[in-house]
Image (tube, rainbow, N blue to C red):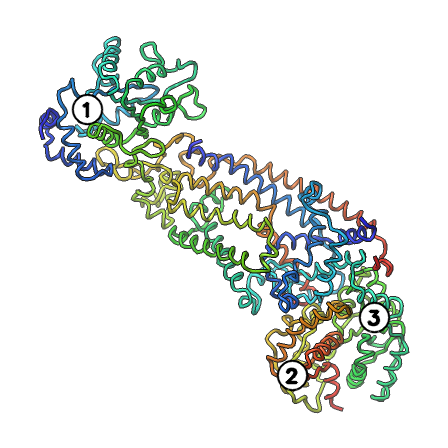
Amino acid sequence: MQGPLIDTLARQGVTRRTFFKYCATLASLMALPPSAGRAMAEAMAAAPAASRRPSVIWLPFQECTGCTESITRSHSPSIEGLIFDAISLDYQETLMAAAGHQAEEALHNAMKENEGKYLLIVDGSVPLGLDGAYSCIAGKTNLESLKEAAKGAAAIVAMGSCAAFGGIPKANPNPTGAVAVSDIIKDKPIINIPGCPPIPVVITGVLAHFLTFGSLPELDKLGRPKAFYGETIHDRCYRRPFYDQGKFAKTFDDEGARKGWCLFELGCKGPVTYNACATVKWNGGTSWPVESGHGCLGCSEPDFWDGGGFYRALSMPADPLKMAATAAAVGAAAGVAITFANRAKKSSAKAAHETVTLADLEK
Amino acid sequence: MSASLQKGINALKEVIDAPVASYFNSCVHCGLCAEACLFYLETGDVKYTPIHKLEPLRRVYEQEYTLLGRLGKMVGLSKAVTDDELEEWKELVYDSCTMCGRCSMVCPVGNDIVYMVRKLREGMAVSGHAPDGIKGATKRTVEIGGPMGLKWPAVANVIKKAEAATGVSINVDKPGVDYLVLLSSMEIVNYPEYLEALVKIFKKAGISFTLASDAFEATNAGIQIGASDIAKVIVSRIINSAEKLGVKYVLSPECGHAYMAIRWEGPNLIGRPYKFEVRHVLEVLEELRQKGVLKMKDKFKEPLILHDPCQIVRRGGVLEAPEPLIQTVAENYIPIVDKQKWNWCCGGGGGASAIHTEEAEALRAKAFRIKKRQIEESGVNTMVTFCANCRIVIEEGFDHYEMNTQLLGLTELLAEHLED
Amino acid sequence: MNEMQFLTWVRGPALDIAIGIFLLGVLWRLIEIYSLGRKVDVAPGRHRDGASGLHTVFRRSVPPPGMVKRSPVTYIGGYVFHIGLAIIVFLFEPHIILIRDLTGLSWPGLPSQVIDLVSVITLGAMLVVLADRIKSPVKRYLSTFSDWFTWTLTFLPVLTGWMAVQHLLLPYTTMLALHILSVELLLIVLPFTKLFHAFTVFGSRWYLGKINGHRGVPV
């Protein structure tokens, strides 16, 4: 295994063996055959000089930078971050040194030089309200920027729930008219990596796949890599046995909560959230929301912000019932009205009664 | 709509009440009532399923007393009840229903199906869709005095014979006595021994009683045909006579529907409780037995079974008296599986035995097979009962199937073995 | 509408509408039925009526002598699916949480594996009961569109609920939404079909018990 990346890694104290293991893990996480791990390691390690590495353009729209934070801000130098050494990140506002016209120039140069080959990463949703005026960069609306950058892209990665599904900006009442990347771009392969933010290893896994095979991994109906979004949090949750036994924390500080019982009753959306948190965990495998005692918010699902409240169990009504009292009153009123009609009808039947005689028995 | 149909529908509108509404809304079409109906069981014909016999009543209920039913009728989703339909239903409501009430015993949702049949007959009768046989019986009861067209001289004749046989003079129209004794026509014509037996027992017990020349007939065809107004006329004869004579009790004879008519329907027909009490002869006999008055000189030796008449036992509530009485007189009483309130009907109750069409008679003969099996399975040659109508129907069944089983009346059996 | 929006809709506005129609229908129908009243029976009772109505409400839950043998499928199938439905509806934890949220009442539930087993048994019993309705001459004769329709509407919630838990056919989110939707359909039609026996059965048995208890016959 030769190449600049491996040297860089070595300089940062990551051994070949560690890197190889990482790639094998990544491959298995993505449900790829074992040989794929070696292929990935070789492909990335052999990444050539900076100018010839695959170009990646990262466009931020209506976002909070959480996705960038997720992948870059680790407490210890994480191997995930090092994946950037295998690519040529030609435009990333937050990370790049350049600013203003220089940055714009870098962007346009990259788009021109790598036309049809670069990978476009988008984080944040695209606002369509007020002709897109809610979010502009260099005098261009996000919509314009996206369309322009998408034209020459080999594929698009919608990073985080905002880019993938509209996310929090799209939450009811969606004041900016935010939409997902896939709502605008229809003619390019798009991979959604939802999550608020997405899990770092999922990002690197997808990038590694693209680098190794030049294609996107297998996706589900919502455009998510099946390997990471194939199962629900609930099905992989270490607290699942408590759910099955019917042991639930009823408040955040009760006996059940202390014993680590299931958080379903406290509104955990694990059963309807497809993500890998329960297996991959966060912060280098330290913990994840449910382990820290809070139910899953379902952040990687479309419209998670409008899912009926984070603290209402899935089997509870999403909204308080509004019609019940009125409906009951209307029902009772209808019943009473029918009662009067029926009484009147029966009285008139009785009034119409003529004493039955033998003659009546004959037709 | 014909005037008679109009009257019929009107009658149904009058009798539909909350129980009927609740019952129709509860039916889940499980078909279990069929398993309790001897006409379905013995013919296998699904049209005899009890709840199905109520179809016209159900539709009138829905169309008249439910909002959705009214709407359904308006837009033509639910078709109105017609004369042709009621004519078709005549067989289901009369020929093939003896109002035995066994279906009401098994319905899992608790529908009192026989309660509804009784109500449906109100509409059937007044719209002219009752069978000729029951119409004739009703006519004779109203015009002559009894369903078989008997008049007082026939009763006087029976009284004379009973006096000769027992040596007791029998009171007629005597006020102030304890009991007014009623007879059914069957007992006058076919089983005059009943009166003899009763005289013998009452003499022994020291009970005073009378017969009434203006109210001797206990039966009430008005109940069977389903014409409450006519039933009221018939039952009023007894009530008036009993209240005029000032008796304490009116004794209902060994006749099923007579007991239903006098004891349970009568007060509701006239709209008030009586000034006397109605007792079934078996209730009185059981009371005498408990007092030690009914001492037997010997016992009936042959093994025998009991046929519990539906209207007296299952529907009339005389549940506890029959068995101790039969055990007093019979050495070898064999309780059958379906006894007391679970007994099977003879097949001719509820007026069915008055229908003499070929089809109705053939159907009754078929339905009788259930009784026949009960007798055969118990392996006895003697059956005892306490309803004159059951006796006639069962004897017809014996003839039809050429069975040599003997059928006895309980009161007579008791009197026969009574200590002198 | 995506899956999550569908789920949120069935948990929100659709549930509101379904429960509204259910309550409206139940009250309307109960009043419509029982306000018809009945005449007082003026014949003196054999003994005091006492609790004969209440007795019959319970007694009718037990099969009469000999009847199980006559119609085993109706009784055993009927018992299994009614008891199964009751267990699933009232003893599955998520359902209890819903009931608690709506009414404030709650009780302990059963482990989900038990509910799973009960669901399979219930589905089986319902299929047997359906086959019996098709096969038995009396049942087939009595059956109308409403019988097939209500069977389907009762079957679907159990089926979709079980399939959702088992992750069969569709993603859990979609299946859960379909499950809730099927329950809502059931709630909406319940007051207007034979399913209303769930309410009137008590009144019917009570009347039967009273009417016959008056004459001294425990039924």
Residues tagged 1 and 3 counted as in contact (Cβ below 8 A) = no
Q: Position of residue C53 (x, y in %)?
A: 63, 60
Same chain assignment for discs 1 and 3? no
Tell me the amino acid under the disc marked 1.
Answer: Phe
Of all chains, the one bearing label 2 is B
Q: CA distance from mark 1 to mark 2?
A: 103 Å
**A134, above or below A314, in the image:** above
Question: Which residue matches tag 3?
Answer: B147
Of all chains, the one bearing label 3 is B
Tell me the amino acid under the disc marked 2.
Answer: Leu
Name the residue located 43 percent from the left edge and 51 percent from the top edge: C108
SS at badge 1: helix
**B36, above or below A287, in the image:** below
Q: Is residue A53 visible?
A: yes
Q: Position of residue A138 (x, y in %)?
A: 31, 10
Tell me the amino acid under the disc marked 3.
Answer: Pro
Q: Nearer the viewer, residue B420 or B148?
A: B148
Mark nearer the viewer, 3 or 2: 3
Name the residue located 38 percent from the left edge and 25 percent from the top edge: A166
Name the residue located 23 percent from the left edge and 9 percent from the top edge: A102
Question: Which residue matches tag 2?
Answer: B304
Q: Nearer the viewer, residue B359 or B378?
A: B359
Same chain assignment for discs 1 and 2? no
Q: How many marks?
A: 3
Q: Circle 3: is it few (<14), some (14-19), or many (20+) Cα within 10 Å?
A: many
Q: Which mark is residue B338?
A: none
Q: Nearer the viewer, residue B145 or A350?
A: B145
SS at badge 2: strand
Question: Which residue matches tag 1?
Answer: A84
